[in-house]
Amino acid sequence: MKLCRLIFQLLLGKRLPVTSGTIRVSGIENPVTVHRDQYGIPHIDAQGEIDAWYALGFSQGQDRAFQLELLLRVANGTLPADKLSRRIGFAHGAELQLDALNSDVKAIYIAFAQGLTEGVRLGCQRVPHEFTMMRTKPTTFTTKDVVSVSRYLSFLMAPN
């Protein structure tokens, strides 16, 4: 296992999220502090709910960019094997759901989507290895994308 990790580091370099210092972002109203504990788990201190959701999205964008990318692609049915996702219509349902949401809930989704996108863009010095190996770039998350992924994850939890 260590040999494999060493080879990846030699070929692609380290691609860890930025976890210290100050990152200036747009999209928040008040300063937000994200402190990571000894295990790398983010602890968010925000003055407002919308800023907290932005910071949560930012942290997840830093830590789980490729996982979120895959979930988005499956939920939107953009991969050839995703006939079921297209048939169920997670993305189409997300559009309809967005129209029905009240403004407070929609603001949470907007902040979270902006945080995800900025977490990948500003929260990492270099894009994660998986994007480099696939020769692709991370998607800019929209509010509809977040709702679509949420619908897909809810669908997966139903059998449990």
Image (tube, helix red, strand yellow):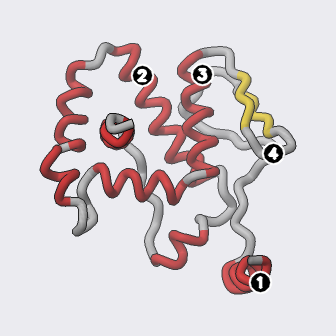
Residue 134 point in image, percent of width and height = 46, 76
The three-letter code of the residue at mark 2 reads Ala
Q: Disc 1 and disc 2: Cα gap in Å?
A: 45 Å
Q: Is residue 111 above or below residue 128?
A: above
Numbered label attached to residue 29: 3
Left or right of residue 159, residue 118 in this image? right
Pointer 4: what residue? 39
Residue furthest to the front in view is 160
Looking at the image, which residue is at 72% across and 43% down? 23
Q: Disc 1 and disc 3: Cα gap in Å?
A: 45 Å
Q: Regarding mark 4 in the picture, which secondary structure is present there? A: loop
The three-letter code of the residue at mark 4 reads Tyr
Give whichever of discs 1 and 4 has the lower sequence position: 1
Residue 121 point in image, percent of width and height = 57, 54
Give the number of the mark in front: 4 or 3: 4
Give the number of the mark in front: 1 or 3: 1
Give whichever of discs 1 and 2 has the lower sequence position: 1
The three-letter code of the residue at mark 3 reads Glu
Q: For the N terminus, which image quadrant?
A: bottom right
Give the number of the mark in front: 2 or 4: 4
